[in-house]
Amino acid sequence: MTDYNNEPGPAPRAAVALVYDETSAPRVSAKGEHEIAEEIIRIAREHNVPLYENAELVKALSTLDLGEEIPDTLYRIVAEVIAFAFYLQGKVPKGFDGGDKTEN
């Protein structure tokens, strides 16, 4: 389930925050359960960071250490989440050409 509007919803049991600087793979910047998860989400909402809820992805990302880059096996799903977050914020990643290569 995706929280497109950053509306308060049921408190999750776990949360993982990623940082992506567009020069390397996304890294785990925060993770936690229960109260820590609630605080991660509160801070994200406070800073208008789009939230994405996916229990299986959180489970996989929770195995990583803070500061650790995501593994290759999670690139596709994390890329899709980040691309959607960029879209919601009206941003375009550096070097992105949109992929619209229609020929005339």
Image: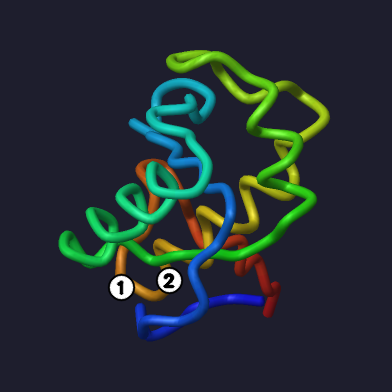
Look at the numbered discs 1 and 2 and tell me whether their residues touch, using CB distance below 8 Å: yes
What is the x, y in percent for residue 23? Answer: 40, 24
> Residue visible at 72% across and 21% down?
71
Query: Viewed as shown, does residue 88 lie left or right of 98?
Result: left
Q: Secondary structure at mark 2?
A: helix
Mark 2 burial class by Cα count in 10 Å: few <14, some 14-19, many 20+: few
What is the x, y in percent for residue 25? Answer: 53, 24
Query: Viewed as shown, does residue 76 lie left or right of 100?
Result: right
Q: How many marks do you count on the picture?
A: 2
Q: Amino acid at mark 2?
A: Tyr
> Residue visible at 46% across and 81% down?
9
Q: In the drawing, what numbered circle is on residue 90? A: 1
- In the rendered image, the vertical position of residue 92 relative to residue 15, given as above or below: below
Looking at the rendering, which quadrant does residue 30 occupy? Answer: top left
Q: Which residue is mark 2?
A: 87
> Residue visible at 47% across and 34% down?
31
Q: What separation in Å lies between label 1 and label 2 (alpha carbons)?
A: 5 Å
> Residue visible at 44% across and 41% down?
17
**Quarter placement of the C terminus:** bottom right
Q: Amino acid at mark 1?
A: Gly
Looking at the rendering, which quadrant does residue 18 occupy? Answer: top left
Along the line of sight, which residue is nearer the eye, 94 or 53? 53
- In the rendered image, the vertical position of residue 84 relative to residue 83, given as above or below: below
Mark 1 burial class by Cα count in 10 Å: few <14, some 14-19, many 20+: few
